[in-house]
Amino acid sequence: MIHVNLLPIKEAQRALGRRQQMSVALLSISVALLVMVVPYVLQGRRIAQLDREITDLSAEIERYNAQTREVRDLEKKRTELQAKLKVIDDLKQKRVGPVRMLEDLSTATPQKLWLVSFSETNGQATITGMALDNQTIAGFMRSLQTSPYFYEVDLVETSQSEPVRVGGDNGMIFKKFIVKAQLDYLGTGGKAQATPTAGPAAGKTGA
């Protein structure tokens, strides 16, 4: 009778089963590691890319901020320059303003009216003179009102003068008057604020 020893075969089968189980376990562990590691690596790369983009954006924002500061500085310098030019222009106008104001005063004075005095205090002119009649005074005030250097022209007072000898006449009676007006040596905005004067009736009329 032949006896076959089956123990080694069973041992080999059990060893093979253990190796298969070990292989399956290792494969499972490898798959699990891949599932965990691959997203981590991809996320790390994405974070690094985002960090680079943030750095680039920060640098671009800083460039824009620098340009904005330059624009603000230029705007400030432009404003200061405009203010200086305005002051220079005002000084030029004020330098020639009195001359043109006197020219307009002379132009507004009719033949039958004579100026006696002219004074100015705090931008207000006081003009005194004599005329043949009230109509001549009214015409003088209307002409003065059209000047850009005079506004708010107002007749303060009129009165009769003492008889004045002219040539061979015994004497002529003139109308003395006092007119006040605001002065604008720049010849710009004053006239827009003026209130038209109604004429000699607006002042005090003497006997």
Image: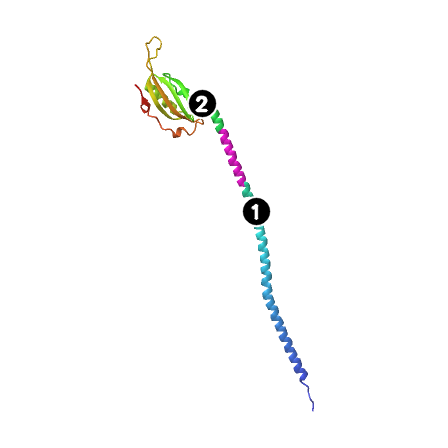
Residue 194 vertical position relative to residue 71 in the rendered view, above or below: above
Q: What span is in magenta?
A: 71-89
Residue 33 is marked as none
Quarter of the image with the C terminus in it: top left
Q: Position of residue 20 (x, y in %)?
A: 63, 75
The CA distance from mark 1 to mark 2 is 56 Å
- Amino acid type for the residue under numbered disc 2: Arg
Marked residue nearer the N-terminal end (1 or 2): 1
Relative horizontal placement of residue 144, taking residue 56 as reference (left or right): left
Extreme residue toward the top, this view: 168
- Amino acid type for the residue under numbered disc 1: Glu
Residue 55 vertical position relative to residue 20 in the rendered view, above or below: above
Neighbourhood count class around disc 1 (C-alpha, 10 Å): few under 14, some 14–19, many 20 upward: few
Residue at (59, 55) in percent of width and height: 49
Q: Position of residue 83 (x, y in %)?
A: 50, 33
Front residue of 70/175: it is 175
Residue at (62, 68) in percent of width and height: 30
Residue at (39, 30) in percent of width and height: 193
Q: Which residue is mark 2?
A: 100
Relative horizontal placement of residue 95, taking residue 129 as reference (left or right): right
Residue 62 is marked as 1
Which corner quadrant of the image does residue 37 belong to? bottom right
Mark 2: secondary structure: helix
* Residue 174 covered by magenta stretch: no
Which corner quadrant of the image does residue 122 belong to? top left
Q: Position of residue 148 (x, y in %)?
A: 41, 26
Residue 167 vertical position relative to residue 157 in the rendered view, above or below: above
Give the overall secondary structure of the magenta segment: helix
Neighbourhood count class around disc 2 (C-alpha, 10 Å): few under 14, some 14–19, many 20 upward: some
Residue at (59, 53) in percent of width and height: 52
